[in-house]
Image (tube, grey):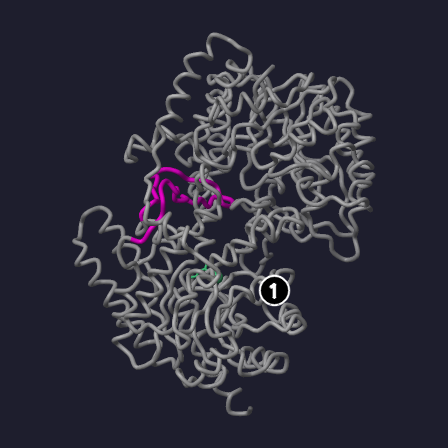
Amino acid sequence: MTTTIIGFPRIGHHRELKFATEHYWKKKIDQAELLKTAAQIRQNHWQAQKKAGIDLIPAGDFSFFDGVLDTANLLNIVPERYRQLHLSPLDEYFAQARGFQQGPETVKALPMKKWFNTNYHYIVPEFSKDTDIRLVGHKLFDEVEEALKLGINVKAVIIGPYTLLKLSRFIDGAKPRDFVDKLVSAYSTILQRLADQGVKWIQIDEPALSFDVDAAEKALFDSLYQPILAAKGSLKVLLQNYFGDIRDIYNDVTNLDFDGIGLDFVEGRYNADLIKQNGFPADKVLFAGVVNGKNIWRNHYTKTIDFLTNLNTQAKVVLSSSASLLHVPYSAADETQLPSDVKQHLAFAIEKLAEITELDHIYHNETAGEAALAKNDALFKNVKHPYNQAVHDRIASLDEADYTRQPARDEREKIQKQEFDLPILPTTTIGSFPQTKDVRQNRAKLRRGEITKEAYDRFNEDKIRRIIKIQEEIGLDVLVHGEYERNDMVEYFGEKLAGFVFTQNGWVQSYGTRGVKPPIIWGDISRTAPITVKASVFAKNLTDKPVKGMLTGPVTIFNWSFPREDVTPKESVTQIALALQDEVLDLEKHDIKIIQIDEPALRENLPLRKSNWYTEYLDWAVPAFRLVHSKVQPTTQIHTHMCYSEFGDIIKAIDALDADVISFEASRADFTLIDQLVAAHFQTEVGPGVYDIHSPRVPSESEVEDLIKQLVTKLPVEKIWINPDCGLKTRSEDEAFASLRNIVDATKKVRSVI
Ligand code: GLN
Ligand code: ZN
């Protein structure tokens, strides 16, 4: 045994699982057919791995929705309200993942959260005093059995108890500690069952060790694993970490009775230092995550082999991926429209399997590896990312002034109050209006070549004309053009900037059956032509009210793309920032005086370790945002938008973006963030969302009025804006217009009494 992977994408080569699952939800197919499709997908994936030469193959990494939810359900962690629905186990599982509605019965879904620093989302298990942890599920054992029958050399995969406790929500006074004994007993039983099935290895995933781990958490980890490992019998246990390094707990982990330790050497480079400083136990197997599970570039074999050799360990080494391949698309062979010089550098999941096998041959000095090594060396000798001297010169010449907007924000605030003369509590929206069927059809027609670009543009202009009228009639103060021309807030900009390329089939699971197709950063990034100017100017000329220009910010464009590995994130983000600076100044030149730069993804890419938040991220990400807008006139008002309210711990960094106004999600009456803003003397004007656009509910006028009144008691009235909490893209027009009317009318009422 010398090669393995942590996990494989589940959605299927052609997203078969997505389509089958959605058909099942719509009752177009029955459960038996869905299960059959799923079994076929698993079989294909195992066989693909076997064929590629992977010799220890994961089972249990498959999921109908999410692996954390699978583990919770295996262990009977199912809140009572879902049991009360009396559904089949699979439907009960989907009810937890997506909510349940039938006649008068409705139960909301469990919350969903970002999976560490990826764009994948997991379902958050709920522990309460009633949670009775017991091994009740059989999905893991069934899948293992299925694989064994197919002659697969199985590694059973499960989320570990420490990560499960770290990621879950605890209600009605329940605490993680309360569940240690039950978890130990359930995991011990799992180990015995797997051993009885004839499984040799289990991989227990503990990515939460990449977070900071304090003394109490270490004790928790030990109290879980000491007894579990005592019960492992003949089964070999691999402790698998990813998304970083395990610096806080390395010695505990290596001292425990694990048979293998899986480390991420891509994101967790520091793991190599840990091995050098502390040694690695010679009697354990080191599962070396050297092939990047989160990015799509070919592995540079010479570098990887040098790295492995330098580890200088006596331990047996098994080559692996750095993370589950869940985070990359299925196969680069499906891409027929990419230039060949780009395509040859791509390795999606299928190609990564071959890479691991080839690296293994090279590492063990097998002749089978020689040709692969030569080919790989040639590839990296000839890599030519489009180089743009002007971009490099521009970055080299940047100094402090380029990152500093003048005059200071409180000065600008006065100037802008005069310039715009808006009523107090100005009303606005976040940018997009409903992407109705006709809007999507118009885009599809252009893509299929059924209409001309002129006809396409004319359609969108009619849409803009209509939405400007509607906004005027509703009585909003700052209008938008509606973003009808955008398929996606990142792809749209990527397509217009030099330096990006796009896949046809590069789907990656985002959550459940939802996928994203991230753009790829390939060359130096620059703006070659105006991007949003035409639509913004068209809208502006239709009304006397100010129309807000609408851009996606540099950090979000970067975070939702596949980044280059030969340049730093800071370098790429700075390039995007400069391209956007050109667009901002162009908008300003065309008399667009309010410009919003969205950064919904700013927070999600915070490093997992708090001590790295600033040094490895915010210290350059925040200035990059400033670079986009630092050169505008004092009279130009810069807005930004973020879709979450969890920035209580980085308030200073948000203020340091130096925007004039920020809008954000502030879920129903939960204004704790507002208190934090007040306490931190937040300076930016704020538009806390007063309408939850994620729900089909139309908030009533009095309800919104109440919210605004609360806001006014907490924040200085001259600093407050009134808006929904995100773009209206996914709502119906009826819902959106009715809600906006209520918002505007409620605002007018409050204004009249202040
Ligand atoms: N301007 C974008 C919109 O309104 C913002 C989307 C987002 O924050 N995700 O759709
Ligand atoms: Zn948003």
Inspect the magenta stretch and tell me whether residue 57 lies in it. Answer: no
Compared to residue 583, the image places residue 702 above or below, namely below
Residue 748 pos. (x, y %): 47, 86
Residue 183 pos. (x, y %): 77, 38
Magenta segment, which residues?
498-527
Residue 390 pos. (x, y %): 32, 49
Instruction: Tell me if 170 is positioned left or right of 658 in this view.
Output: right
Tally of numbered discs: 1
- Extreme-top residue of the structure: 367
Q: Residue at x 50, y 69 (%)?
A: 662
Please state which of residues 19 and 266 is positioned toward the viewer in this rendering.
Answer: 266
Q: Residue at x 18, y 49 (%)?
A: 450
For the C terminus, the quadrant is bottom right
Q: Secondary structure at mark 1?
A: helix
User: Hey, what amino acid is under mark 1?
Assistant: Lys
Please state which of residues 576 and 118 is positioned toward the viewer in this rendering.
Answer: 576
Compared to residue 360, the image places residue 553 above or below, namely below
User: Which residue is identified by label 1?
Assistant: 652
